[in-house]
Amino acid sequence: MARYPLLATAVPDESLHQSLLDVLQSCQLEIIHDTADYVMAREKPSGIPYAKLVTVEGLIDKTGATRDQIRVEVVIKNEELPVHSDNHCSRMRDSVYQALEDSSHWSIVAS
């Protein structure tokens, strides 16, 4: 199973959760589970083998939140074995990473 974690931070405000949803949807991901602190999205089938379809989980960690920042762990994964470093899941990770970077809310801490 391919699995790529990203750790991002953002300034906590009312639009933070919606910003995460917007970032995932901009990557052509469909939101399948959405709570106040957890979001799960999946890639829409479009000619890609089922094992390569990507699922993205975003966990908003409110326990360690400060007035200035909140941590969000994003995990991009699929059932594909990561035999090559340039695989479908890693390309989707790059897409999510870029979408987070392009958004004014987010900054990437680690990937």
Image (tube, grey):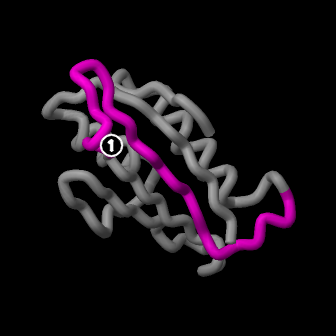
Name the element at disc 1.
Answer: helix
Inspect the magenta stretch and tell me whether residue 9 lies in it. no
Quadrant of the image for the N terminus?
bottom right
Residue at 46% in and 35% down: 8
Q: In the rendered image of this protein, does residue 109 appear above or below residue 90? A: above
Q: In the rendered image of this protein, does residue 29 appear above or below residue 12? A: below
Relative to 32, is 78 on the left or the right? right
**Mark 1 lies on residue:** 20
Inspect the magenta stretch and tell me whether residue 83 lies in it. yes
Relative to 99, is 11 on the left or the right? left
Residue at 55% in and 43% down: 6
The image position of residue 38, as x and y in percent, is 30, 57
Segment tinted magenta in the rendering: 61-84
Residue at 39% in and 62% down: 41
The image position of residue 2, as x and y in percent, is 68, 65
The image position of residue 42, as x and y in percent, is 44, 66
Q: Kindly give the residue lying farthest to the bottom in the view shown.
A: 50
Q: Nearer the viewer, residue 57 or 42?
A: 57
Three-letter residue code for mark 1: Leu
Quadrant of the image for the C terminus?
top right
Relative to 80, is 65 on the left or the right? left
Q: Nearer the viewer, residue 10 or 100?
A: 10
The image position of residue 100, as x and y in percent, is 46, 34
Q: Kindly give the residue lying farthest to the right in the view shown.
A: 84
